[in-house]
Image: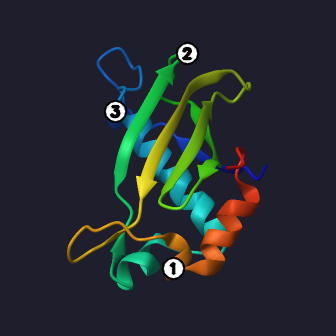
């Protein structure tokens, strides 16, 4: 299983009054991890958009395990949990510098045509990208 890693410095603006990371920022970090994974494989989301496609989130889940605080660094680990004809599920772990898990999660995406939001197979529009996801996915369909 291929896992990309991206370090994120926790900024003051990402915390609440107690200095604890506000829960919605984990979603932003998951996007950072997803983008890093895609780019590490040689593709770009911007390229997908330029070709007239989007990949909206259809489901997202986060399980919070250990609070992160201002001044720490988080590592976002991202992988392809599963990849099918229309849906791709990304898996995430956000971890403390000492390896303790701060949060885990998944996000499910589909590729759609920008003009009408109709689903389209990644295999049809980007066969190399589709093949790479099928190769590295954790769960085989």
Q: Earlier in the sequence, mark 3 or mark 2?
A: 3
Q: Position of residue 71 (x, y in %)?
A: 52, 30
Residue at the spot of label 1: 124
Residue 24: give its label: 3
Left or right, residue 98 beside residue 12: right
Residue at 79% of width from left, 49% of height from top? Answer: 1
Residue at the extreme bottom: 51
Residue at 53% of width from left, 42% of height from top? Answer: 9
Residue at the spot of label 2: 66
Q: Position of residue 25 (x, y in %)?
A: 38, 36
Depth order, front residue of 53/85: 85
Q: Where 92 falls versus 124 (above or below)?
A: above
Left or right, residue 120 beside residue 6: left
Secondary structure of the residue carrying numbered label 1: helix
Query: How far is disc 3 from disc 2 in space, using C-alphas?
Result: 15 Å
Crowd class of label 1 (few under 14; some 14 to 19; many from 20; radius 10 Å) = few
Secondary structure of the residue carrying numbered label 3: loop
Q: Position of residue 22 (x, y in %)?
A: 35, 26
Residue at 38% of width from left, 40% of height from top? Answer: 59
Left or right, residue 84 beside residue 17: right
Secondary structure of the residue carrying numbered label 2: loop
Q: Residue 113's quadrant in the figure? A: bottom left
């Amino acid at each position: 299983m291929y896992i990309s890693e991206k370090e994120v410095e926790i900024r003051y603006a990402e915390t609440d009054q107690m200095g604890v990371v506000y829960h919605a920022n984990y979603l932003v970090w998951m996007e950072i991890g997803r983008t890093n994974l895609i780019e590490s494989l040689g593709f770009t989301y911007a390229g997908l958009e330029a070709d007239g496609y989007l990949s909206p989130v259809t489901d997202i889940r986060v399980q919070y395990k250990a609070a992160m605080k201002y001044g720490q660094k988080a590592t976002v680990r991202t992988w392809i949990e599963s990849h099918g004809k229309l849906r791709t599920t990304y898996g995430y772990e956000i971890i403390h510098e000492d390896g303790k898990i701060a949060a885990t999660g998944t996000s499910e995406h589909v590729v759609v045509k920008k003009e009408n939001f109709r689903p389209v197979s990644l295999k049809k529009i980007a066969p190399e990208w589709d093949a790479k996801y099928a190769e590295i996915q954790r769960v085989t369909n």
